[in-house]
Amino acid sequence: MAPRPYFNDKGEVLPLVELMKLEKIDDWTFRSCSKAYEPTGGGNGAYGGFIYSLSAWAAAQTVAEGQILHSVSGNFILGGIPKEHFDIKITKIRDGGSYCTRFTTVSQSKGICFTSICSFKRSETSAIDLQDPHMNIRTHYSSVLSGKSYYDHPEAPSQDSEWFRQIYLPKHPDHYNPLPGLHLRKVDMKAYNEPRHPIDRRQLIFYTLRGRLPEIDKERPSTREANLHAIGHLFASDRNSLHIIPNFNDLGLSASRIASLSHTVTFHVGVDKLFMPNEPAGRNPRSPPTEGPDGEVWSGEADESQRKWFVQEAWSTRSGGGRAFHTSRLWDMETGVHLATTVQDGLVRYREGAELKL
């Protein structure tokens, strides 16, 4: 049977919990059930964040209750085939008292396409809780955020490249390819970035949950299912990541090849701070609708005051040799807590004659 499409014939998009469904083959082997997101909807490869987050969720099925995901380091070996299932094999490296580690191997018909190391840990208290005291997203980026609601920012594009905007979309005016699992809104950073060097430029992406996730029990916050809240942040962390680098360098149409090589996400907080509240039932006319859970029909206008938003603050620190380095921080927009840090090494090649003008 083919993987389940990520939006139905009504244009309703799969919620995260459905997107992350797994078929259990045995205690250490799982298979994807949903189709991987393909940015142009035309079989040009799968969004790496899908298998990155899904393999971590598969690894979470093999750890004891109380172990919560805190770090994932993955390597992309071959591009994914969206129309095929992914087979995920988990290997136990170690089960310790506080930490445990799993190795994941993901395969399709052409062989191994992804591997990762997933580390889980038990919750613990600490006398020290320190983060950058000078960063406040709203004030630091007030030139691009002031006076705007989250939905005043456009939906993040299927592919954040000049090729997609200037060549693909004009040829496909009816393009409809919403991202499942999350709502993403891209901030227009022109006012902030234009006067800055490429290394000092930034991109903000707001994200929020589609659908509902298992509630975190205050008496038992570290259940295995609680890991799904961390998985939501993983799924957001790689979205359009490397494409921002040619944009920062004003070389968008000169990019000839872009692909993830490795990606690491480290969470700095417990699962209680990663909690993604349920999406409010209903619709927002400025965003593709979510498929209602368990056959529930979501109609009417959603109460947006009940929606919780997070933000990815991304930049690049190095480009050269056909590669580029992407870094980001994930923040809770309501509390200002720095949730996670991501680093990614990627293949970013330019056409012959491309010239960086500083």
Image: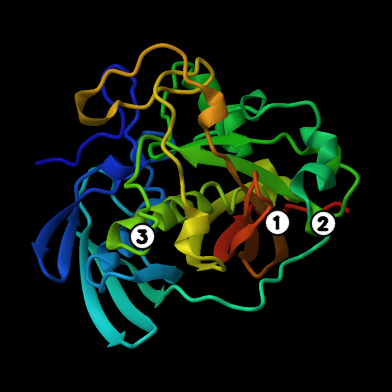
- Report whether 28 appears left or right of 252: left
Query: Which residue is labeled 3 in the image?
Result: 219
Q: Is residue 302 visible?
A: yes
Q: Which mark is residue 315?
A: 1
Instruction: Identify the element where label 3 is drawn.
Output: loop
Q: Residue at position x 20%, y 37% from top?
A: 4
Front residue of 44 and 38: 38
- Report whether 250 appears left or right of 267: right
**Which of the 4 image quarters holds residue 194?**
top right
**Which of the 4 image quarters holds residue 283?**
top left
Q: Is residue 26 above or below residue 79?
A: below
Q: Residue at position x 46%, y 56% from top?
A: 234
Query: Where is residue 300 shown, x and y percent of the image?
Result: 41, 11
Report the Cα–Cα distance between label 2 and label 3.
Answer: 44 Å
- Image quadrant holding the N terminus, namely top left
Instruction: Identify the element where label 1 is drawn.
Output: strand
Q: Residue furthest front?
A: 219
Of mark 1 and mark 3, the one earlier in the sequence is: 3
Query: Which residue is labeled 2 in the image?
Result: 200
Query: Where is residue 221 shown, x and y percent of the image?
Result: 38, 60
Circle 2 crowding by C-alpha within 10 Å: few under 14, some 14–19, many from 20: few
Instruction: Identify the element where label 2 is drawn.
Output: helix
- Report whether 236 appears left or right of 97: right
Marks 2 and 3 in Cβ contact (< 8 Å): no
Circle 1 crowding by C-alpha within 10 Å: few under 14, some 14–19, many from 20: many
Q: Residue furthest top?
A: 300
Report the Cα–Cα distance between label 1 and label 2.
Answer: 7 Å
Q: Residue furthest right?
A: 195
Q: Is residue 18 above or below residue 246?
A: above
Of mark 1 and mark 2, the one earlier in the sequence is: 2
User: Disc 2 residue type?
Assistant: Asp
